Image (tube, rainbow, N blue to C red):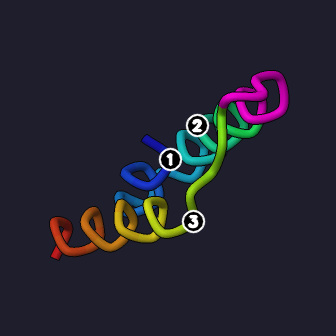
Amino acid sequence: MATRARVRGNRAEFYHWAMVAAEIARISPQAEMDIEMVTAVVAEEERRSG
């Protein structure tokens, strides 16, 4: 959701979803960030937006 908001240029929505993701990662020991997956999601959203 954060990536989609960023690609659309919605700064407030991007900030909101980035903070949600950070909080989930902080409170959940099972929530791991896989940078390769994040990079792939960002690339796909950017490709879709043209």
Gap between marks 3 and 1 measured at Cα = 15 Å
What type of secondary structure mainly makes up the magenta span? helix
Q: Nearer the viewer, residue 50 or 23?
A: 23
Pick whichever, 32 or 17, lies toward us.
Answer: 32
First-in-chain label (2 vs 1): 1
Question: Is disc 3 surrounded by few (<14), some (14 to 19) or many (20+) residues within 10 Å?
Answer: few
Q: Residue at x 48, y 69 (%)?
A: 36
Number of labels in the image equals 3
Residue shown at 56% from the left, 47% from the top: 14
Badge number at residue 17: 2
Identity, as a three-letter code, of the amino acid under mark 1: Ala
Q: Which residues are magenta?
A: 23-30
The picture places residue 15, in percent across and down from the top left corner, at 66, 45
- Mark on residue 35? 3
Q: Is tag 2's residue or tag 3's residue first in the polypeptide sequence? A: 2
Quadrant containing the N terminus is top left
Give SS at disc 2.
helix
Residue occupied by mark 1: 2
Secondary structure, mark 3, is helix
Q: Residues within 10 Å of mark 2 (few under 14, many from 20)?
A: some
Q: Quadrant of residue 37?
A: bottom left
Does the residue at mark 2 contact the one at mark 1 (Cβ under 8 Å)?
Answer: yes
Residue type at mark 2 is: Trp
Judge whether residue 11 is colored magenta.
no
In the image, is residue 46 above or below residue 30?
A: below
Tag 1 or tag 3, which sits nearer the N-term? Answer: 1
Residue at point 60% right, 43% down?
12
Q: Position of residue 32 (x, y in %)?
A: 66, 43
Residue 21 spot, x, y in % from top left = 65, 36
> Where's residue 3, x and y in %?
44, 55
The amino acid type of the residue labelled 3 equals: Ile
Does residue 49 appear to the left or right of 40 in the view shown? left
